[in-house]
Amino acid sequence: MFRALFVCLPFAAFGLLLLLFVLPTCRTMRLRTRLAVAAVFLVCCSKFLFFKVVGGDEFNPELPQWVIWAYGWLYSGAMLSLPLSLLFFFLPRRVKLFALPAVAWTVSALGVWNGVKAPPVREVELECPGLPPELDGYRILQLADIHVSSSARRWRTEAIVAKANAANADLVVCTGDIVDGPPETRWRDVEPLRDLKAKDGVFFVTGNHEFYGDWHGWSAIYRKWGFRFLQDECVFPREGLALGGMDDEVGSRLAFLPPDDRVFAVERLFSAATNGAFRVLLQHRPGAARRNALAGGVGLQLSGHTHGGVAPPLRPLVAAANGGFVRGAYSLSSPPPAGHDGLLYVSPGCGQWAGFPVRLFNDSEISLLVLRGRP
């Protein structure tokens, strides 16, 4: 149903483009010209159908990277033409005919490249209430939403790993959505993650996309490579630090529990942290962060999933679906009588899902988080 919706929706968009742009703008032109313009938009809107028929999968076709990028550019430009056609509605037809495609496909090209390029390392200092003095200056490198795919292959993974290792963090964590695609075709593109290094180890948690593919096959490969997934468990990378990780609710038993029981699950997760250790929780989705801080005593939660809101027009929708959290640091302070202080950092992610390949005015990042105690 989900895949069929993505295949069909662009054709509805094509109908709107005809009404809002092609017919009003080209009505003084010959019929042949109008049909040609309509055909161009129809081809652009047929990306998912083309990928399914020619590449074998709507979202991750086995096609050359340049073909996937080119069609992503064409498709995204056509989709951007919808809102732009409303903004340009009062312009003269001749100006609109050239201005709209030029703006739409230029912005689309920038957005597609932002989605597939290797992101820079962004260092952020986080003031963490309750941080033990011995952890002041502790450096956690967070990788979120890498989305290795047929359009973002081994070259990008190698670049991400090289930048991550060069940051010389104390701890490396990956908060889900590592790969899109089956192990037999994508394992070589994911393999460079084996080279991630940190003084206190490298830890992973699952995201929703782990369970949309062959998780059984991938988990066998990850075990062979020595990846440490925290699946509803807690470890102590160093004295004074409790690191907990939860499976994404898509593949977890938590998906079948009511919200109150999920709170108890967070409490149980840190039940071994009885020595006053600072609690850091890895959870792919940020929506439950306030509840986790209050009930589980979480001092810092690290999440991803939102892709930073993807693009400005989508940001309110992404926020509404994720408890108001989109990107960056959020205070989770609760009022008395609870009075617990916590912090959430939502990484905008290292990549972009191939189903919507554009990041607009929303840079990806490798997050280097430096923990600081309150003075």
Image (spheres, grey):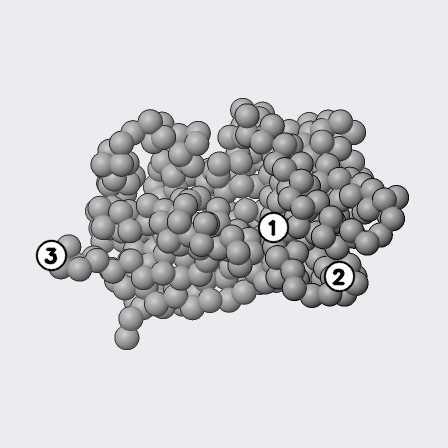
Q: Residue type at mark 2: give it.
A: Arg
Quadrant of the image for the C terminus?
bottom left
Q: Where's residue 241, x and y in %?
A: 33, 53
Q: Which residue is mark 1?
A: 351
Image quadrant where residue 62 sits: top right
Instruction: Using the numbered discs, state the Cα–Cα distance from disc 1 to disc 2 in whole angstroms.
Output: 38 Å
The answer to whether residue 24 is visible is yes
Crowd band around label 1 with a 10 angstrom C-alpha radius: few (<14), some (14–19), many (20+): many
Q: Which residue is mark 3?
A: 337
The answer to whether residue 149 is visible is no
Q: Which residue is mark 2?
A: 93
**Contact? badges 1 and 3 (CB < 8 Å):** no
Which element carries disc 2, helix, strand or loop? Answer: helix
**209 up-or-down from 314: above or below:** above
Quadrant of the image for the N terminus?
top right
Q: Where's residue 187, x and y in %?
A: 67, 34
Q: Closer to the N terminus: mark 2 or mark 3?
A: 2
Q: In this orientation, which residue lies closer to the viewer: 3 or 170? A: 3
Q: Nearer the viewer, mark 1 or mark 2?
A: 2
**Contact? badges 2 and 3 (CB < 8 Å):** no
Q: Residue type at mark 1: give it.
A: Gly
Q: Closer to the N terminus: mark 1 or mark 3?
A: 3
Instruction: Using the numbered discs, state the Cα–Cα distance from disc 2 to disc 3 in whole angstroms.
Output: 63 Å
Identify the residue at image location x=51%, y=67%.
123
